[in-house]
Image: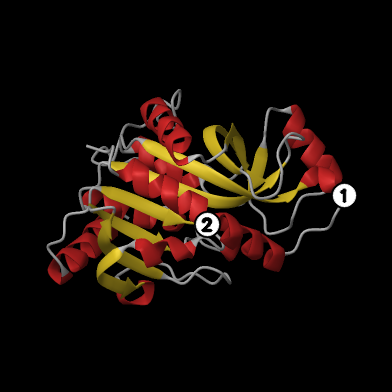
Amino acid sequence: MLSKIKEATLYLRAKTDYQPRVGIILGTGLGGLVEHIDIKLAIPYEEIPHFPVSTVEGHSGRLIFGELAGVPVVAMQGRFHYYEGYAPEQVVFPVRVMKMLGISALFVSNAAGGINSTFRVGDVMVITDHINLIPNVLIGKNHDELGPRFPDMFEPYSKELIAAATAEAERLNIKLQYGCYVGTTGPTFETPKEYGYFRFIGGDAVGMSTTPEVIAARHMGLPVFGVSIITNAAFSGQKSTHEEVQQEGRKAEKRMTALFSALVTKVK
């Protein structure tokens, strides 16, 4: 896997000498942030050696190099999921490559189901912790060049970036929620009892992504900032559909874009 990461990185470096400072992963229905990036280069995933290809509606499948608020970034317009049939190391392959390209922080976003009864559809939740129920991406051979065998996860999401995001949200008059994200395999939406269980163990929102990427990022020493857009609510008593998740994600996208645009300028 390490040789494949290096091969993909060399391919991208041959395409551009652009040096991104922040990596961004855009979740379901949230790819519109790319419209605010001054794009220097966009490469379809299928052209990059060893990259998986996104198979989920709402995930465009391009790696974007450009500037967001004047800051050099590399953005994934569409991510990969364990439920698509990819092995865990394939799911996080782009995170590894972005680190090799030189990013110093990773921003992640997702569409999530709200399991905290104080949340409402459309809320932006800053992820302060997570519970990973997806097979751990670090199982198997460890490559010391990427990170330690037993990485610490006491601070999976950067307290410094969360504090900066809070300050920027106040300035921009964006209401934020804060909570713990539960990462599950999917692809089924949760049963009522599963929602209750996730809330009982400390979850505030639940989704089918993000935690593998964050584990890989922390394994490599990257600070992470994450947000969940609450696109459906467990306590509403309504059934969930992928189409509705995408629609609600697009509604909240402007606030997430404003927050990310302000926050990238704080990354050194």
For disc 2, the neighbor class at 10 Å (few under 14, some 14 to 19, many from 20) is many
Label 2 belongs to which residue?
253
Q: Is residue 181 visible?
A: yes
Is label 2 or label 1 in front? 2
Q: Which residue is mark 1?
A: 237
Quadrant in the picture for residue 119 = top right
In the picture provided, is 200 more to the left or to the right than 47? right
Asked if disc 2 and disc 1 are in contact, CB closer than 8 Å, the reply is no
Disc ID at residue 266: none
Q: Which amino acid type corresponds to the residue marked 1 in the rendered image?
A: Gly
Residue 198 spot, x, y in % from top left: 73, 35
Compared across the picture, whether 119 is left or right of 268 comes to right
Mark 2 element type: helix
Taking the spot 29% from the left edge, 48% from the top edge, the residue there is: 22
| Image quadrant where residue 156 sits | top left
The spot of residue 205 in percent (x, y) is: 66, 40
Q: How many marks?
A: 2
Residue placed farthest to the top in the image?
154
Secondary structure state at the residue bearing disc 1: loop
In this view, the residue in front, 84 or 190, is 190
